[in-house]
C-alpha cells in the first residue's frame, strides 16, 4: 500500500486511487492523476487540501483556526484492494506488523549481559524462541459492521484466499471485535512457490478447483497479538500477549509443520504419519494454530537453531519477553536467526542498476548445474557497484560465491546474496 509521496509525480504506471471525498476507488495513471489536479472521475471533486477554518467564538468574533489534517488520497496496487477501504475505522490504528532484526546484531550484547551479572534470578536473561515458518505473513482483524474476518498482507492488501479459515476464526472475533492477530499462512503439503500461488490468487481469477485447494490446504499459524481489549495496555509485553494467544488458540502447531521439507519422498511418509489434527468440534481438521515459544538461554541458541532446522523449519524467531509490539519497525524485541548456505555458480550475465544504482551493477546473472538462471545482487557500496559494472566483461564466465537460505523446488537459491568472485590471488577483483 502506497501514498503519493512514495512515487514520482511523472510516473506512468497505472494505480488505484481512493477519493478523499466520496471514498470510491478508481484506476488512473499516476502522472495523469497529478496533471488533472487529483479530480475524482466519480464525484468530479479535487482531493481535499489543508484549508484554514474560520469560526465565531463565544464572543461573536471571527477566529481563524489552524489548518485541519486531511487524509491524502490513498494509492494502492492496481490488482489488489486496500484493507482500509472496507475498514475505515482502522485508519486511526497502526496495522503495520512488527519486523525482525538479525540475531547476529545483538548476540554479543545478550551473551555479555547474561554472563556479567551475578546474583540475579536464573530466568532473568531467558529468551523465548519459536520455530520460523516458511510461510506468508498475514494479519487478521474483524469488521464488526459486516460481521466478517479480514485477512491482509504486511502491505495492507486484502488476501482473498482465506475462505476456508474464516469459520474457525469467527467465534474468536465475535467475542473480542478488537482482536488483531499476527501470523503466517502456511500449507504444509506445498512448497513455497505453490503456497505463494494459492495466497496471491484473486477471486476473480480463480476457478472452483483453485478455491477448493485454498480451503483444503491453507492453514494459519498465529505467533503474536497486535491488538486486543483483553491485554493490559497497548504496550503489553510479549509474555502477556503470548499467554493470551495460547488461551485463544490452544492448539499448538509445532508437530503439524515439523519435518516438512522439499524432499517429496520424505514428505509422503510424514503426511501419512501426521496429517491433519481432527480436534475441531465439528469433526473437521483444525486449521488455526499458535506457534510455540520456549524459554531459551542465549548461549543455547545455536543448538536450538540446529534442532529447528533438522526438523524442517527455516530458522528460529527469538523474542525478548518484556518488549511491546512495535508496529511498522524492525524491533530489537524480535530477532531472526537462520542457517545460511554457500555455493559457487557461474556468472553468465549482468543486470544494469536502476534508481539509486543507475550506471552501476544491479545484479549478476548466474546459472545452476541444471541450467536454471537466477539473479543475485551484491551488498556493496554504490562506488563498488560502479567498478563492477565497468569491469563486468572480466567477470563473465567466472564463478561467484553466493550465500542463500535454501534451494527452491527448482533447485534455485532463495534469497541469494553475491559474496565473492573467484579471481586473482590478490583479491583485486573480489567483491
Image: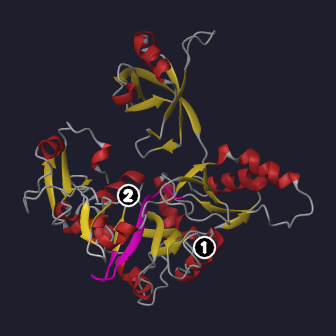
Image position of 162 (left or right of 268): left
The mark found on residue 195 in the picture is 2
Disc number at residue 12? none
Q: Position of residue 310 (x, y in %)?
A: 63, 54
Of badges 1 and 2, the one in the foreground is: 1
> Which quarter of the image is occupied by the N terminus?
bottom left
Asked if the stretch drawn in magenta spans residue 365, the answer is: no
228 to 193, vertically: above or below: below
To which residue does mark 1 refer? Answer: 242
The number of callouts visible is: 2
Quadrant of the rendered structure where residue 426 is?
Answer: top right
Q: Is residue 45 left or right of residue 414?
A: left
Which numbered disc flags the more N-terminal residue, 1 or 2? 2
Q: Secondary structure at mark 2?
A: helix
Of residues 307 and 247, the one drawn nearer to the viewer in this rendering: 247
What range of the chain is rendered magenta?
Answer: 133-149
| Front position in the image: 87 or 272 | 87
What is the quadrant of residue 285 in the picture?
A: bottom left
Secondary structure, mark 1, is helix
Determine the residue positioned at 41% across, 53% down. 192
Q: Are marks 1 and 2 in contact (CB under 8 Å)?
A: no
Does residue 30 appear left or right of residue 186 in this picture?
left
Q: Quadrant of the C terminus?
A: top right
| Residue 42, percent from left and from top | 7, 61
Q: Closest to the observer: 401 or 334?
A: 334
Amino acid at each position: 500500500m502506497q501514498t503519493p509521496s512514495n512515487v514520482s509525480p511523472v510516473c506512468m504506471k497505472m494505480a488505484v486511487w481512493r477519493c478523499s471525498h466520496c471514498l470510491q476507488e478508481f484506476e488512473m495513471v499516476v502522472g495523469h492523476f497529478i496533471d488533472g489536479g487529483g479530480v475524482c472521475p466519480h464525484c468530479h471533486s479535487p482531493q481535499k487540501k489543508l484549508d484554514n477554518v474560520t469560526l465565531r467564538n463565544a464572543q461573536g468574533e471571527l477566529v481563524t483556526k489552524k489548518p485541519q489534517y486531511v487524509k491524502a488520497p490513498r494509492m494502492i496496487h492496481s490488482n489488489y484492494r486496500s484493507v482500509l477501504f472496507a475498514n475505515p475505522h482502522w485508519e486511526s490504528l497502526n496495522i503495520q506488523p512488527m519486523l525482525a532484526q538479525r540475531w547476529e546484531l545483538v548476540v554479543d550484547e545478550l551473551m555479555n549481559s547474561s554472563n556479567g551479572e551475578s546474583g540475579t534470578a536464573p530466568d532473568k536473561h531467558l529468551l523465548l524462541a519459536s520455530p520460523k515458518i516458511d510461510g506468508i505473513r498475514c494479519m487478521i482483524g474483524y469488521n464488526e459492521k459486516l460481521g466478517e474476518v479480514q485477512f491482509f498482507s504486511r502491505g495492507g492488501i486484502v488476501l482473498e484466499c482465506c475462505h476456508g479459515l474464516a469459520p474457525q476464526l469467527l467465534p474468536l472475533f465475535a467475542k473480542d471485535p478488537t482482536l488483531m492477530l499476527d501470523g503466517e499462512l502456511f500449507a504444509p503439503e506445498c512448497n513455497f512457490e505453490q503456497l505463494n500461488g494459492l495466497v496471491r490468487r484473486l477471486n476473480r481469477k480463480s476457478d472452483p478447483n483453485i478455491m477448493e485447494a485454498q480451503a483444503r490446504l491453507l492453514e494459519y499459524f498465529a505467533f503474536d497479538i497486535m491488538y486486543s481489549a483483553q491485554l493490559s495496555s497497548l504496550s503489553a509485553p510479549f509474555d502477556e500477549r503470548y499467554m493470551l494467544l495460547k488461551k485463544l488458540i490452544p492448539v499448538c502447531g509445532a508437530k503439524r509443520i515439523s519435518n516438512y521439507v522439499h524432499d517429496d519422498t520424505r514428505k509422503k511418509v510424514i503426511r501419512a504419519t501426521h496429517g491433519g489434527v481432527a480436534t475441531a468440534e465439528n469433526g473437521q481438521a483444525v486449521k488455526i494454530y499458535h506457534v510455540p515459544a520456549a524459554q531459551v538461554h542465549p548461549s543455547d541458541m545455536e543448538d536450538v537453531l540446529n534442532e529447528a532446522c533438522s526438523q524442517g523449519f527455516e530458522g528460529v524467531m527469538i523474542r525478548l519477553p518484556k518488549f511491546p509490539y512495535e508496529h511498522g519497525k524492525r524491533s530489537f524485541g524480535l530477532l531472526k536467526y537462520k542457517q545460511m548456505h554457500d555455493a559457487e555458480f557461474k556468472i553468465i550475465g549482468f543486470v544494469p542498476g536502476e534508481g539509486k544504482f543507475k550506471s552501476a551493477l544491479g545484479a549478476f546473472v548466474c546459472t545452476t548445474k541444471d541450467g536454471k538462471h537466477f539473479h543475485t545482487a551484491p551488498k556493496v557500496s554504490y562506488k563498488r557497484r560502479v567498478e563492477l559494472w565497468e569491469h563486468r566483461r572480466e567477470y563473465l564466465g567466472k564463478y561467484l560465491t553466493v550465500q542463500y537460505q535454501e534451494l527452491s523446488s527448482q533447485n534455485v537459491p532463495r534469497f541469494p546474496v553475491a559474496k565473492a568472485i573467484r579471481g586473482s590471488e590478490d583479491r583485486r577483483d573480489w567483491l
